[in-house]
Amino acid sequence: MTSTSQPTVFPGDSAMSAIMRAHDWSNTPLGPPENWPEGLKVPLRMMLTSRFEMWLGWGPDLCFFYNDAYVPTLGVKHPKALGRPMAEVWREVYDAVEDRIVSVMQAGVATWDKALLLLLERSGYPEETYHTFSYSPLFGDSGAVEGLMCVVTEETERIISERRIEALHHLSSALLSCQTRESVLSVAERALARSDRDFPFVVMQALNDGVALSSGTDGSLGAVRWPVGDLAPGCEWLQVPLEGLVEAVPTGPWDVPPREALIVPVSIAGRPSPVAALILGQNPYRHVDAGTIAFAQLLAGQVAGALATIETRDREAAEIGRLRQLFEQSPSFMAILRGPRHRFELVNPRYRQIVGHREVTGREVAEALPEVVGQGFIDLLDRVYTSGEPFVGQSVPISLDKPGAAPEPRFLDFVYQPIRDNDGVVSGIFVEGIDVTAAHDAAAALRDSEAQFRTLAEAMPNHVWTTRADGMLDWCNTRTYEYSGAEAGSFDGPGWIDLVHPDDRLETTRRFSAALKSGAVYENEFRLRRADGAYRWYIARGVPLIGEDGTIARWIGTNTDIHEQKANAEALAELNQTLEQQVSQRTGELMAAEEALRQSQKMEAVGQLTGGIAHDFNNLLAGISGSLQLLEKRIGQGRFDSIQRYLDAAQSSSKRAAALTQRLLAFSRRQTLDPKPTNINRLVADLDELIRRTMGPSVDMEVVGAGGIWLTLVDPNQLENALLNLCINARDAMPHGGRLTVETANKWLDDRAARDRDLPPGQYVSLSVSDTGTGMTPDVMARAFDPFFTTKPLGEGTGLGLSMIYGFVRQSGGQVRIYSEVGHGSTMTLYLPRYVGEAEDTCADHATRGHEYSAHGETVLIVDDESIVRMLVVDVLREAGYLVLEAADGPSGLKVMQSAARIDLLVTDVGLPGGMNGRQMADAGRLLRPDLKVLFVTGYAENAVVGNGHLEPGMQVITKPFAVEALGNKVREMIDG
């Protein structure tokens, strides 16, 4: 890539842009970036300049690209993931998302998942993660889906935090009803069972009377000798391996059991040692981190708080105990400040967690948390204390220091509530709130997503609009206002209806109101006023967006200009209405219009065909490429046990690709035929059993072969395919069974009969297939040979079968005719020219030669401009013992033939560069070497060059692709002959 093109493909100064510019793309399936399609470059530029987490995949293997924001999600996979197949990068979760990828790549349908659980191996081990993401199709220059874009938000921390908050809330609620120490342990054990994703099993063990309770099991865990004695005073937690300690470890909701347990003391203030131990099986897909420990300590703290409350109640200090219990159990952070200097009197665990577990009790806010002084919080506290008015803050930013770590920006919802003494004087402030950083980030992500939507909508050529759930329009893209000449925002609410033609407003309002009521997709055609006052036809389509509660949140829609289509349809309708009066004057115009329409339909069908062919070839190339890559990998690893399987897979895909190519060449009438003198009676007899099996028991089959049938010069393999195709069509025309007749005959066609069949007069061999099925109407018969025309249901026929038969027969010098009557059946007859000569022995089994094509000192000249093909042919023949000469074009090959070198056989490609094709070179070589034998290699429409199958003696043709055994046998056969 040139230095000037790099910033264009990989713009910006991000780290990933620099890495991509330095990456060697020439060794990847995508090739040099300057050759990449715009369908890849445009989303790639958008992704690299975005700060939102994004990745995209391109090509059959979804070659992996990602931006800086996505690097943390990859973890240790970065930067090796760049350019690798998506299935390889995320192999551990590919099965979970494969159906979504298939939906995008094959159907072009976008997907969206919210908080999907994925076990990612981004830190060297399977890790529980949650992601909200969307897969959107990326279209190549041909219009086909060639890749996908993923916009993702990792929500692991939010999901885990919310479920932990819920667990704390549930535990706190459950503990409120406890009246005894035993009930605290029992209720806590049952409540903590809801935290089985964090802790697959929970054991509550009292330390003074031997009572043990467990969850997630049958109670056997309570009998385990847990090392709770290691909880020395001051010990905040222990991590214990379970191997050798517990025989059967409960798995909880996971598919593997925990490997470690976390033991947290349940301590009551004023006690020298813990009163109980909370034993928690560790989530096998999460390592023990500070958050897990803090959560476990909060759980233990809530249990401890409940126990302390009971003890305090027993000591007749219920009021203080309840207050402490609320503090200890609350999922929100709380603190009580006293005096005008705001001294901490009491803080809860969540508050301690928020401030990094710093000791703040007894200290003033400015002293305990100096970093908040310059952030305005002291001023807020002073104002509340002085005024006696509470303050409520929402999503207030704050930067808090954490011991041993950089300052951490957070967002808080909180309230400062003044505390008054018995005289009504403010004596302190109650602080309560929650950390809403995750929700704030999610809201920011939503705003970014909406901004991206607006950007895409502004780039579309259509009118794009959105409405509220009640149908009131609240946004249009710029193109809408440019078209109408109205001021931006003037269509908000119901004002957009003024843009609709007065005659169309009633129906438009009725349809949109019905859609709003039913929730169905809204679709309508109407005229919209342009800025110059002219009206144009548009089709509007709107879809509802469903919220999390299952109701419609809003509508999004587009208006697409269909004015030209509408005008063409109206013109055609007017033409049909006046056809009887204007036949003579407008016949030519009608034919031209019909031809244009037919050509449009054909082009649409060609588009569908090319899309399908691209899909099929991509699948075949994926089979070949994947097999070869795995073959290379296995050989490099020294593993040879699976080599044959990959070879078979690659060969199978290549054979299927060759068959697909032959079908296309047959359809284009440019396939390379191998005509041979053929007895069609013998050909029908050889296929008799296969046809009968194909017809099934409900169809009776009769074969009527003419005596003394003439020979015809035709490709027997193609004739067999044509016969099978006709028989299958006949069977499909008899859904309830019937009779099938295959008949051969000799035909003399005089001038009139030949003219009726569009053939030269003379002798012909006919092959007819008749059925007693539904028959065809004259209109169907007239279009039967049209490419892509079919009467079968969608998905059951391509409309290419009869077209390919017609192309093959016409290429063979013959003709096809249909005779049909609705309700009585049809007859398809192939007319093929008679061949005067001897029939070839088609029964010889050349395949049995195997590898018997060894050389005896002969010399073969290979001429092919395709270096890979030339290399393979040279290697095959040299391995067989031939002396091989090679050239890359016609002039070079002729120069070799002008030398004194011995040449027993010339093997040449037909299409050669250098101003001289293969046939011209062979003819020139025969002037120098009259007995030179020539084997032409052709892969496309080069029949005219090699003589359309009619070659001089000593010349033969072999079609690409070919098996190496077939090439060796052909070379040996020609040299021996």
Image (spheres, grey):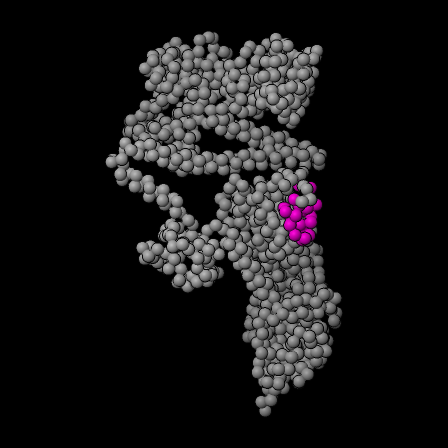
Quadrant showing the N terminus: top right
The image position of residue 440, as x and y in percent, is 58, 65
319 shown above or below 42: below
Q: Is residue 786 left or right of residue 863?
A: left
The image position of residue 953, as x and y in percent, is 55, 10
State the predominant SS element of the stretch in magenta: helix
Q: Residue furthest front?
A: 532
Q: Is residue 925 left or right of residue 545?
A: right
Q: Which residue lies furthest to the bottom in this view?
A: 423
81 shown above or below 672: below
In the image, what residue occupies the spot 63% across and 20% down?
890
Quadrant showing the C terminus: top right
Nearer to me, 624 or 8: 8
In the image, residue 276 lies in the stretch drawn in magenta: no
In the image, residue 12 lies in the stretch drawn in magenta: yes
In the image, what residue occupies the spot 53% across and 58% down?
450
In the image, what residue occupies the spot 65% across and 27% down?
868
Nearer to me, 208 or 249: 249
Q: Which picture quadrant has residue 268? A: bottom right
The image position of residue 196, as x and y in percent, is 59, 61
**Magenta stretch?**
5-25
In the image, what residue occupies the spot 57% across and 72% down?
394
For residue 3, say whether it is visible: yes
The image position of residue 423, as x and y in percent, is 59, 91
455 shown above or below 647: below
49 shown above or below 682: below
